[in-house]
Amino acid sequence: MSEFFYLASQSPRRKEILDSLGAPYRLLNLVEGAGQNADFDETPIPNEIPIQYVKRISLIKAAAAWQHLMKQHLHRAPVLTLDTTVTIDDRILGKPRDVEDARLMLQSLSGRSHQVLTAVTMRRGFDVHQSLSITTVCMQSLNEDVIESYIKTAEPFGKSGSYGIQGIASIFISHIAGSHSGVVGLPIYETSELIKKFGFSLL
């Protein structure tokens, strides 16, 4: 039995949540992208539905993390991987490529409800478990000036759907149904249940 697990994520928000829970983890940094030096590729498959996409990417990350442990001869502790995506009208809203992409995403979310999906996977060897968090988020109507002012904060970049509920964009959210921590990127309940399956306790 390992005394710790690896968090295979560069997200400071996920780290902060695990820190607040006193979870026994160590960071494992993987490289994302489509190049030869990347550990995994997050590119959606054509016509892939959002739930299938987020679950597949979390599994791909877990496989890449486990392979990384073996290649680097690291302690073979369980690896925890997560993938979060925003979806509206069955479309996947990933991280914005540029200002115009962020603008279009925010316009599409303005005044409407959307879903935030976070797939959580934990793996040790061939022992793999996965859980899915689905949260409905209602965003108030945003006029052009508000969208432009928000983009200028740079907060939309690097975040699925072009907003961060834990930041300034929290003032745009009128209601959520589901897991607030799941929208941030690490659903506490689902993650804690997976951690228990691998022998870890948060109490």
Image (cartoon, rainbow, N blue to C red):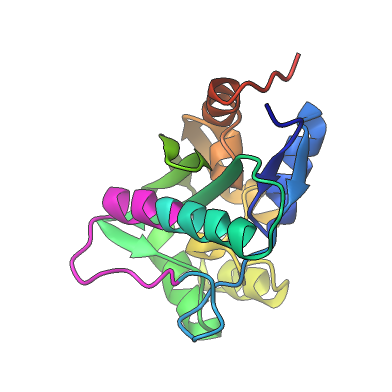
Residue at 61% in and 65% down? 71
Q: Nearer the viewer, residue 126 or 31?
A: 126
Q: Is residue 126 above or below residue 1?
A: below
User: With 171 as the anchor, is 53 left or right in this view?
Assistant: left
Q: Residue at x 46, y 79 (%)?
A: 101
The magenta region covers: 41-58
User: Where residue 54 sits: x, y (%)?
Assistant: 38, 52
Residue 196 sits above or below residue 35 on the image: above
Image quarter of residue 182 = top right
Image location of residue 102, percent across then percent down: 51, 74
- In the image, residue 177 above or below residue 113: above
Q: Nearer the viewer, residue 56 or 154?
A: 56
**Which quadrant is home to the N terminus?**
top right
Q: Nearer the viewer, residue 187 or 157?
A: 187
Q: Relative to 144, is 167 above or below?
A: above
Where is residue 139 shown, x and y percent of the image?
48, 48
Of all residues shown, which one is farthest toward the left?
47
Is 200 magenta? The answer is no
Residue 190 x/y as whole percent: 51, 28
Left-right relation of 84 to 153: left
Q: Tell me if I can see residue 137 in this picture.
A: yes
Q: Is residue 54 magenta?
A: yes
In this view, the residue in front, 2 or 161, is 2
**Is 109 placed left or right of 31 in the picture?**
left
